[in-house]
Image (tube, rainbow, N blue to C red):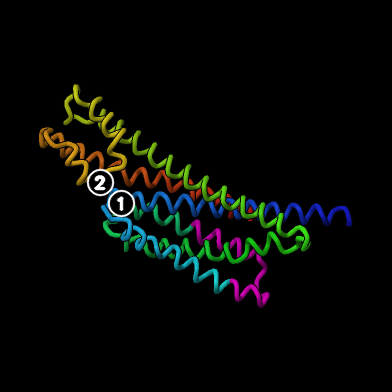
Amino acid sequence: STDVQPAVIVYERTAGITQQLLQQIALGGTMIVLPIYLQMVLEYNALLSGLSIAPLSLSMFGMALLAGRRAGKGKRRPSSVIRLGFALLTVGLVSLVPIVPRADSGWYLLVSLAIAGSGLGLLVSQLNNYTLAPISEERVSEAAGVNSAGGSFGLSFGLAVAGGVMLAALSLSFTTKTEASSVIPAGQQEQIAQVLEDDAQVLSNTQLQELLAGQPQQVQDEIIRINTDARPLALQVALLVPILASLLGLLNS
């Protein structure tokens, strides 16, 4: 038993760091794709975009405080709280997928973001303590550094991958829909697809209309339609990154 016990502790703490990594990937992926979507599709400025995703941060903060106090009373095992946290996070993110194409205001996202934020709050309240609790005092600074590095890497990874997936999905959707259009002249399809691929993925419909000035009205309308259809699909694809991370966390828990 003296040989097994240290190995069990190492395994559990490694699992805790993995959980934090997955939690940060889910958080980073969500925090990058939603503001981009809100600014491009709903044409929100940075302030309105921040206010629209505030339910995620506020519910995360409130639930972390509540769960931290209850954990101090020893009413629930950390593993149970972590499992519940990943379950709520998964439910909140999955519920965004059907809402996205129908949302014409940030209010539509409120309930889903509150659920996901509550799950993140439960995770934040437990993972650090769970990972660092058995570490001896002389090694706790090293362990905290590894834990922090894992979390930072996860956040950066989530931001980069989810953002890249969203832009790649936009580019592919733009090109496919443009080439399949019966309205846009065949001679202009390649040129327009290239413009959309290079520029439109970071423009709102209003800005895109300015870019298309001089084109026939029916061509402008068709490109706006393509742009409008492509962006919700791109966000839905990009949300698969944080959803997958939260599902892996749930399975690992």
Q: Position of residue 182 (x, y in %)?
A: 19, 29
In the rendered image, the vertical position of residue 124 relative to residue 221, given as above or below: below
At horizontal 20% and vertical 46% (from top left) the residue drawn is: 206
Q: Could you say which disc has been placed on residue 39 in the image?
A: 1
Say whether marks 2 and 1 touch (CB < 8 Å): yes
In the foreground, 48 or 104: 48
Q: Could you say which disc has been placed on residue 251 in the image?
A: none
Count of number-bearing discs: 2
Answer left or right for 83 relative to 91: right
The 10 Å Cα crowd at callout 1, few under 14, some 14 to 19, many 20 or more, is: some
Say what amino acid the circle numbered 2 marks: Ser
Image quarter hosting the C terminus: bottom right
At horizontal 49% and vertical 71% (from top left) the residue drawn is: 62
Q: Quadrant of residue 178?
A: top left
Quick one: label 2 or label 1, which is nearer the N terminus? Answer: 1
Say what amino acid the circle numbered 1 marks: Gln
Q: Position of residue 11 (x, y in %)?
A: 74, 52
Q: Position of residue 220 (x, y in %)?
A: 15, 37
Q: Position of residue 114 (x, y in %)?
A: 43, 65
* Helix, strand or loop status at disc 2: loop
Q: Which residue is mark 2?
A: 204
Answer left or right for 214 relative to 100: left
At horizontal 67% and vertical 57% (from top left) the residue drawn is: 144
Image quarter hosting the N terminus: bottom right
Answer left or right for 72 relative to 46: right
In the rendered image, the vertical position of residue 125 relative to residue 9, given as above or below: below
At horizontal 60% and vertical 76% (from top left) the residue drawn is: 69
Question: How far, Cα to Cα, is label 2 from label 1?
Answer: 7 Å
Answer left or right for 133 relative to 253: right
Chain part drawn in magenta: 68-90
- Dominant SS in magenta: helix
